Image (spheres, rainbow, N blue to C red):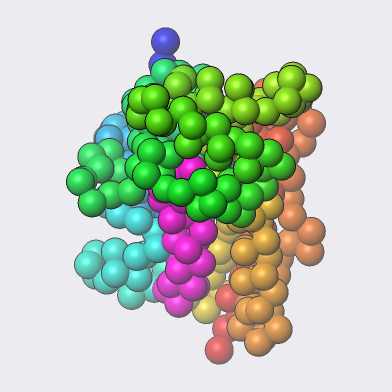
Amino acid sequence: MTAKHISVLLKETIDNLNLQPGDTLVDATFGGGGHSEYALQKYKGIKVLGIDQDENTLHTNCARLKKDYQNINCVVGNFRNIFEVLEKQGIKEVSAIIFDLGFSSLQLEDSGRGLSFKKDEPLLMTLSSNPGIDDLTAQNIVNDFSVETITDLLKTYGEERFAYRIAQGIVEARKVSPITTTFELVEVIKNSVPAFYQKGRIHFATKTFQALRIAANDELSSLKEGLQSGFECLQSGGHMAVISFHSLEDRIVKQFFKNLAEQNLAKIETKKPIVPSDGEVKENPRSRSAKLRIIKKIPE
């Protein structure tokens, strides 16, 4: 059964963009297309450009929206290159940009690339639909990197308390045979952590999978570059909205917005991040860690 994608903080994000007819919205992490669809419904006469690395997800959901809305266009790309993407589309500036840094349910559960520890899939974790021979994958990391490097990745990107024990377990397991699937990795992690950790509120593999995914996709560097590039493309008075899902992302977004405000380049619209309501968390448990921050570019 195909998973249903539920966009997080949907109304809170779109309702604060204050778009007018003729404005252009860039959905820099198009995914399931939920934010774009609601924006097209709410703001008549706007244009939407969707960007996503995942070619299959992008084309599937863009085609679905095009049946009802003609003023949407979609481009395969990494949001770290948002300036170049817009330039190729002949767009000099835009009215609003959305970054939803989470993954759609479809990507997590039906990717076939090992993004979820709940499915036995090839251990790739890349967001690219067709990773090339030069693309870094989670499989490369667990089978080729040293115990010290894996430990550092799990600590830095996953904030994993048992990073060294897991890294040791990975290195020992790969001596017997390469780790090539998600379930093989989950079993290694399980055998590496204490029994109490296996029964915690958060699945014991969550932080390791997060760390490997971030490393495989260079996510934090991409975010820093995408925020800067996106802000440069934003017109005066335009809005940028960012939904983050873990502390590393939120820290980068918070600091970037703070720096802009201190330079009097932008006004922070959210003194505190907007978080999902109890009702939203109950309907969609994956939304529980989401934080929405919004800035408005100060007119020159």
What residue do we see at 30% from left, 54% from top?
77
Q: On the image, which quarter does residue 11 sit in?
A: top right
* Position of 23 relative to 174 (above/below): below
Task: Look at the image and tell me in which quarter the C terminus lies.
Answer: bottom right
Q: Magenta: predominant secondary structure element? A: helix
> Residue 137's quadrant in the figure?
top left
Q: Identify the residue at the far top of this view.
A: 1
Can you say whether 109 is above or below 264 in the image? above
- Find out whether residue 221 is within the magenta segment: yes
Q: Position of residue 86 (x, y in %)?
A: 31, 66
**Residue 16 in view here:** no
Classify residue 287 as left or right of residue 113.
right
Count of numbered circles on the image: 0
The residue range painted magenta reads 212-234
Quarter where residue 230 is shown:
bottom left
Residue 22 to residue 282: above or below: below
Q: Which of 124 and 245 is in front in this view?
A: 124
183 to 90, vertically: above or below: above
- Residue 39 in the figure: left or right of residue 241: left
Residue sitting nearer the eye, 104 or 152: 152
The residue lying at 29 percent from left, 69 percent from top is 84
Q: Which of 140 and 249 is in front in this view?
A: 140
Residue 94 visible, this orientation = yes
Q: Which residue is pictured at 43% across the width and 39% down the height?
A: 142
Viewer-nearest residue: 171 or 1:
171
Is 249 on the left or on the right of 103, as rendered? right
Question: Where does residue 157 sit, x and y in percent of width and height?
Answer: 58, 51
- Check if residue 155 falls in the magenta segment: no
Residue 6 placement (x, y as % from top left): 54, 30
